[in-house]
Image: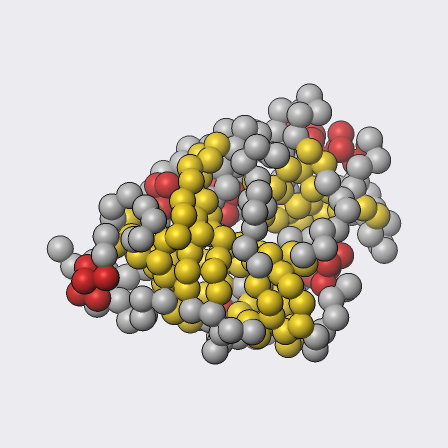
């Protein structure tokens, strides 16, 4: 089990017992749900239909959970037209490989992971333009009531900007480098809704954000937002991790409601939402 990560809380997975999460994967896989992998394993998706929260699980040939990745699918997802310009292998986990995109209307490269990991990446037409659904998971977020407040804050981003910080490689094990599917994003809130993940037990915010070159779906734990309540017309900025899927969905879905008690995971999800250890993206001026 790895360290607790706020990626789960970002879509309301606040379940205390990891054993219950692993049990759902075993039940779903035993029922034949999911899609087979080339190595004899299976891809299983656990989906809370009401909130749109998902966990995407890779099960190895031995039946053990190999990796898990949260994602989110709203009822009417935003679409991004982008060219697939490169693959940046993770080096440790093939399901965490980073794909580099060139948004049609953006002046920046964007790094994303695919929710179905290697199963999706192996099918991508690199060099071509595709239509994607992209979701930003906000690790941190600051909200400003209007443009004057944002400009006076000293944040080094324009009001609508995407800074692909994750494409600056970080040092990894044995001298290797590793890119991340992250970026700093600022933009104007178009819509916001509060959702409850019935499987995970937590609440989260779904935002639609108008930023440079795209309109983006984003999710965030309410406790990770600094400033006034998020409302349409307000300006937000945050550090986001990006998960994508092709417009044509991969047919591997396991819906909640099969009598199980929770989603599947290979590492624990936080049991109590909160601000513990949360760092500020930028300093705020009073």
In the orientation shown, which residue stands out farthest toward the top?
259
Q: Position of residue 271 (x, y in %)?
A: 47, 32
**Residue under the point 85% across and 55% down:** 38
**Residue under the point 62% across and 61% down:** 132
Q: Position of residue 47 (x, y in %)?
A: 64, 37
**Figure check: 126 above or below 27:** below
**Figure check: 159 above or below 68:** below
**Residue under the point 41% across and 48% down:** 191
Q: Nearer the viewer, residue 280 or 34?
A: 34
**Residue under the point 53% across and 59% down:** 242
Q: Position of residue 53 (x, y in %)?
A: 56, 40
Q: Nearer the viewer, residue 21 or 256?
A: 256
Identify the image quadrant of the N terminus.
top right
**Figure check: 157 above or below 205:** below
**Figure check: 121 above or below 61:** below
Please state if 7 lies on the left or on the right of 30 as rendered.
left
Q: Nearer the viewer, residue 271 or 259?
A: 259
* Residue 267 appears in the picture as rendered: no
* Residue 211, picture quadrant: bottom left
């Amino acid at each position: 089990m790895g360290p607790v990560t706020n990626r789960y809380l970002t879509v309301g997975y606040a379940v205390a017992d990891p054993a219950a999460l692993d049990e759902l994967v075993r039940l779903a896989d035993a029922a034949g749900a999911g899609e087979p992998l080339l190595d004899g394993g299976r891809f299983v998706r656990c989906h809370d239909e009401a909130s749109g929260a998902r966990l995407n699980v890779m099960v190895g040939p031995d039946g053990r959970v190999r990796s898990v990745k949260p994602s989110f699918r709203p009822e009417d997802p935003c679409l991004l037209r982008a060219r697939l310009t490169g693959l940046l292998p993770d080096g440790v986990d093939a399901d965490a490989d980073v794909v580099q995109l060139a948004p049609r209307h953006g002046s920046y490269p964007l790094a994303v992971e695919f929710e179905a990991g290697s199963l999706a990446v192996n099918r991508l037409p690199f060099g071509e333009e595709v239509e994607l659904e992209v979701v930003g998971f906000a690790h941190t977020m600051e909200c400003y009531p209007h443009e004057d407040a944002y400009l006076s804050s000293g944040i080094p981003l324009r009001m609508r900007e995407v800074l692909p910080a994750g494409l600056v490689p970080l040092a990894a094990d044995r001298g290797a480098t590793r890119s991340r599917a992250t970026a700093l994003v600022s933009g104007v809130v178009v819509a916001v809704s509060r959702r409850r993940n019935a499987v995970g037990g937590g609440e989260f915010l779904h935002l639609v954000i108008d930023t440079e070159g795209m309109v983006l779906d984003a999710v965030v734990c309410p406790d990770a937002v600094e400033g006034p309540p998020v409302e349409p017309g307000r300006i937000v900025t945050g550090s986001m991790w990006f998960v994508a899927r092709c417009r044509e969905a991969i047919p591997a879905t396991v819906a909640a409601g099969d009598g199980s008690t929770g989603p599947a995971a290979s590492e624990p999800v936080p049991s109590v939402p909160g601000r513990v250890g949360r760092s500020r993206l930028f300093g705020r001026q009073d």
